[in-house]
Image: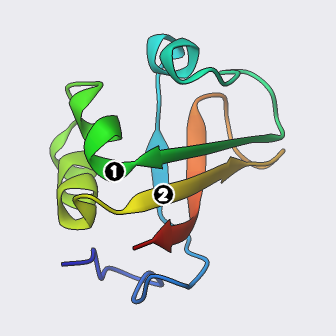
Amino acid sequence: MLYTDGDMKTTNETTDVQIYTDQDQCEAFGVSYFDSEAKLVVYAETLLGSKDYDEKHKEILESLGTEMLVLKRNGDLSPGWWKITRVIK
């Protein structure tokens, strides 16, 4: 089941759904917490298991289950925040 709030309706759409990772997670995944331009590719379940997320994050990540996420950060996002740009089955 996919998280279907807002713009995220299929596995091939760019979305406005944002996910947060803390500095420890970024270090574990080998990405920068602070760089304004960054990319992270990770399974939703791996991300969910790496932090005690709040209910909104849990709802999003649990609904994506074993899907692979492509997360990107650009200059518009604060450190640690990512936009889900693709979901790969």
Give the left or right position of residue 46, taking residue 70 as reference. left
46 in relation to 34, above or below: below
Tag on residue 61?
none
The percent coordinates of residue 87 (x first, y second) are 48, 70
Q: Secondary structure at mark 2?
A: strand
The percent coordinates of residue 88 (x first, y second) are 47, 70
Mark 1 and 2 residues: CB-CB less than 8 Å, in contact? yes
Q: Secondary structure at mark 1?
A: helix
Q: How many C-alpha atoms fall within 10 Å of the one at disc 2: few (<14), some, or many (≥20)? A: many
Which residue reaches farthest front? 89
The percent coordinates of residue 13 (x first, y second) are 56, 84
Give the left or right position of residue 44, taking residue 38 as reference. left
Between the C-alphas of marks 1 and 2, the distance is 6 Å
What amino acid does circle 1 point to? Ala
70 in relation to 73, above or below: below
The percent coordinates of residue 62 (x first, y second) are 18, 56
> Which quadrant is the N terminus positioned in?
bottom left
Residue picked out by circle 2 = 69
- N-terminal label among 1 and 2: 1
What amino acid does circle 2 point to? Leu
Residue picked out by circle 1 = 44
Q: Residue at x 47, y 30 (%)?
A: 21
